[in-house]
Amino acid sequence: MEKYKALGLKLTPQRMAILNYLDGNKEHPSAETIFKALKKRFPTMSFATVYNTLENLKKIGYLVELNLDPQKKHFDPDTKPHHHFICEKCNKIFDIYHEIPLPISKIEEEGFQIKKTHIQFFGTCPKCKKIS
Amino acid sequence: MEKYKALGLKLTPQRMAILNYLDGNKEHPSAETIFKALKKRFPTMSFATVYNTLENLKKIGYLVELNLDPQKKHFDPDTKPHHHFICEKCNKIFDIYHEIPLPISKIEEEGFQIKKTHIQFFGTCPKCKKIS
DNA sequence: TTACTTGCAAAAGATTTGCAAACGA
DNA sequence: TCGTTTGCAAATCTTTTGCAAGTAA
């Protein structure tokens, strides 16, 4: 909230609702999911506001945009570096918190400057594995 | 080509043009890039055919769909496992061929079944690093 | 010949934008 | 009050789809 104000951004009920919805959320929701969830309590809430707010939150580093699903963007309020597992059966996204050593220096020797790394694991999640 | 026929798919001039365009291509083109490049030689080529063909090529394992750019899909005819570096300045996609050991077994112990992994590196490419 | 493909245009789905009215500071 | 934000609708962009006409085998 303070970060928001520090940027000269106003703290509106809609923004607080979105912040609340995302706080501690491990579901990696899409804009649509967020919109639908909040539409109930804020019947006039519009997509524009959701996208606008998500964009602002991304800018101030409050959330990360995930590019795991070719269909739509997902959002993750957990900004600590971690990786993701995408279940090809149920399409759910899971957090992978293992610290995984990567040969950054080897790649940087080739002239690349690495700011961020992200590992995508694809496969079947524990629940779907049991069912099949 | 044989794979195409083996699937009961016809080898049309459009499909051959797309196969030719992709063969050895390291540019990770998008559907639009492919379409525009081929439109010159095949003025009647349509987006539908490009998407249709890319979908077929994906199914027979001739190419891989890359999900690196939130704006659009990119396609990679190199189906050997490798990773990618995305330059945040010029947005070009580079191949990273290092074999990188990942703690698959640790994650699988948690019940996940991993079929594929892909590492995304974000940062500045050698060329853009020099300029800035 | 015949089933698969193409090309067109329209549709669909996600995201963005313009702008007047509403509102937080 | 004043500048930012909201909500609506329209616009945009990528990708998909329906279907009649065309074509590889």
Image (cartoon, coloured by chain):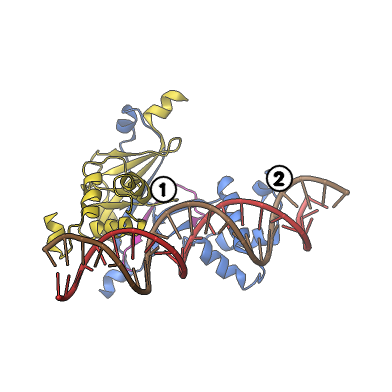
Chain colours: A yellow, B blue, C brown, D red
Q: Measured from the top left, where is residue A104 in percent x and y? A: 26, 53
Q: Residue A97 or A108: which is nearer the viewer?
A: A97
Q: Residue B121 or D2: which is nearer the viewer?
A: D2
**Element at label 2:** loop
Q: Measured from the top left, where is residue A52 in percent x and y? A: 30, 60
In the image, the segment drawn in magenta is B75-89
**Element at label 1:** loop
Which residue is identified by label 2? B8
The residue carrying pointer 2 sits among few (fewer than 14), some (14 to 19) or many (20 or more) residues within 10 Å by Cα, namely few
Asked whether the viewer can see residue B99, the reply is: no
C15 to A24, vertically: above or below: below
Q: Measured from the top left, where is residue B52 in percent x and y? A: 61, 54
Left or right of A123? Residue B126 is left
Which residue is identified by label 1? A69
Label pair 2/1, CB-CB below 8 angstroms:
no
Q: Quadrant of the N terminus of chain A?
A: bottom left
The image quadrant of residue B84 is: bottom left
Asked whether the viewer can see residue A117, the reply is: yes
Residue B65 magenta: no
> At label 1, which amino acid type do we have?
Asp
Q: Give the residue at x 63% y 59%.
A: B49
